[in-house]
């Protein structure tokens, strides 16, 4: 029986590359076939990564139902981030770098969960642990996925393990100036021409259960967020529609400027005071600047969640 490997909904580069890199690893170790999959469309950034290393025509299979399947999940353990029938699948493994979520299993599983900057760094450690050589093309994609998740080492989630992994992966794939390639990747990610408000709001969007309330948090990482200033009200209007349609208590969108190293927060909430308390800010027209905030995982979720207890 095949095992499908995939990350969360609205997949980012870590999820897509993680599915590819982990599938290759497991296929060197086990008789069962591991198949990289995805739950949604790939982003412009991920398309850049795949094309950069010859995987442009090897986009993982779309998998929106997994009942009765064996699966290995990457980059989350929150039930809300997976297929509606994830509870009907057999989860054989997890590779993640987030807080422990609410997924449960009926059988023992392999679990690699580390408080580091990227799931692909976890997978890199798996390769090293099993003594499997990383192919040049996969090494390059893993390198860029780590540089994306750590915002080229600027994110507070970045660890020495992540920087070491990038340096070793860059040697394997033969890329000397990996920071320049990463900046080209972020420029590709920053493209917004022709994108709808819904596309922008959901490019990297996750929903969380917090004290019985649903909270949606999205993030747009860009080289220069000023290009979105004329569209901020449009984004807020679409956030209101998303909130009503999804029965959300709160929806937050972070417009993250990787050069200025901070994020403009857009917030729609039933209780804005919770968000103001979380960040010790005053919202003005549903907006606020968060100096130094680059990570949803480390600098947003841990501060918002206690407000709902």
Image (tube, rainbow, N blue to C red):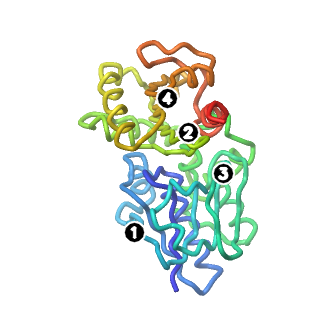
The answer for how far apart the CA atoms under marks 1 and 3 are is 23 Å
**What residue is pinned by disc 3?**
97
Badge nearest the viewer, 2 or 4: 4
Disc 2 residue crowd, few under 14, some 14–19, many 20+, Cα 10 Å: some
**What residue is pinned by disc 4?**
256
In the image, 65: left or right of 279?
A: left
Which residue is at a point 76% across and 67% down the rendered structure image? 129
Q: Residue furthest front?
A: 212
Is 254 drawn above or below residue 100 in the view shown? above
Disc 4 residue crowd, few under 14, some 14–19, many 20+, Cα 10 Å: many
Q: Earlier in the sequence, mark 2 or mark 4?
A: 2
Q: Earlier in the sequence, mark 1 or mark 2?
A: 1
Where is residue 214 drawn, in percent x and y? 51, 42
The answer for how far apart the CA atoms under marks 1 and 4 are is 30 Å
The answer for how far apart the CA atoms under marks 3 and 4 are is 20 Å
Q: Front-most of 178 and 108?
A: 108
Is 304 drawn above or below residue 290 in the view shown? below
**What residue is pinned by disc 1?**
61
Q: Earlier in the sequence, mark 3 or mark 2?
A: 3
Where is residue 237 drawn, in percent x and y? 31, 28
Q: Earlier in the sequence, mark 1 or mark 4?
A: 1
């Amino acid at each position: 029986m095949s095992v499908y490997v995939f990350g969360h909904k609205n997949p980012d580069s870590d999820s897509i590359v993680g599915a590819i890199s982990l599938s290759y690893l497991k296929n060197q170790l086990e008789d069962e076939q591991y198949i990289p999959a995805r739950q949604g469309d790939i982003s412009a950034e991920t398309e850049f990564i795949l094309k950069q290393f010859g995987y442009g025509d090897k986009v993982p299979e779309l998998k929106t139902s997994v009942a009765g399947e064996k699966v290995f999940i990457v980059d989350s353990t929150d039930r809300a981030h997976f297929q509606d029938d994830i509870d009907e699948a057999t989860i054989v493994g997890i590779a993640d770098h987030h807080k422990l979520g609410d997924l449960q299993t009926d059988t023992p599983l392999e679990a690699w969960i580390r408080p580091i900057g990227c799931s692909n760094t976890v997978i890199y450690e798996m390769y090293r642990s099993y003594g499997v050589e990383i192919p040049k093309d996969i090494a390059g994609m893993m390198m860029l996925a780590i540089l994306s998740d750590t915002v080229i080492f600027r994110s507070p989630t970045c660890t020495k393990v992540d920087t070491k992994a990038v340096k070793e992966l860059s040697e394997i794939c033969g890329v000397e100036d990996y920071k320049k390639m990463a900046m080209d990747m972020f420029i590709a990610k920053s493209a917004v021409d022709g994108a709808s408000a819904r596309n922008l709001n959901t490019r990297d969007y996750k929903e969380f259960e917090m004290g019985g309330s649903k909270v949606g948090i999205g993030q747009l990482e860009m080289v220069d967020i000023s290009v979105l200033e004329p569209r901020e009200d449009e984004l807020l209007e679409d956030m209101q529609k998303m909130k009503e349609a999804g029965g959300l208590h709160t929806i937050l969108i972070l417009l993250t400027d990787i050069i200025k190293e901070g994020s403009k927060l857009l917030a729609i909430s039933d209780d804005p005071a919770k968000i103001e308390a979380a960040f010790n800010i005053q919202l003005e027209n549903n907006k606020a600047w968060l100096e130094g905030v680059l990570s949803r995982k480390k600098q947003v979720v841990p501060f918002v969640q206690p407000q709902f207890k």
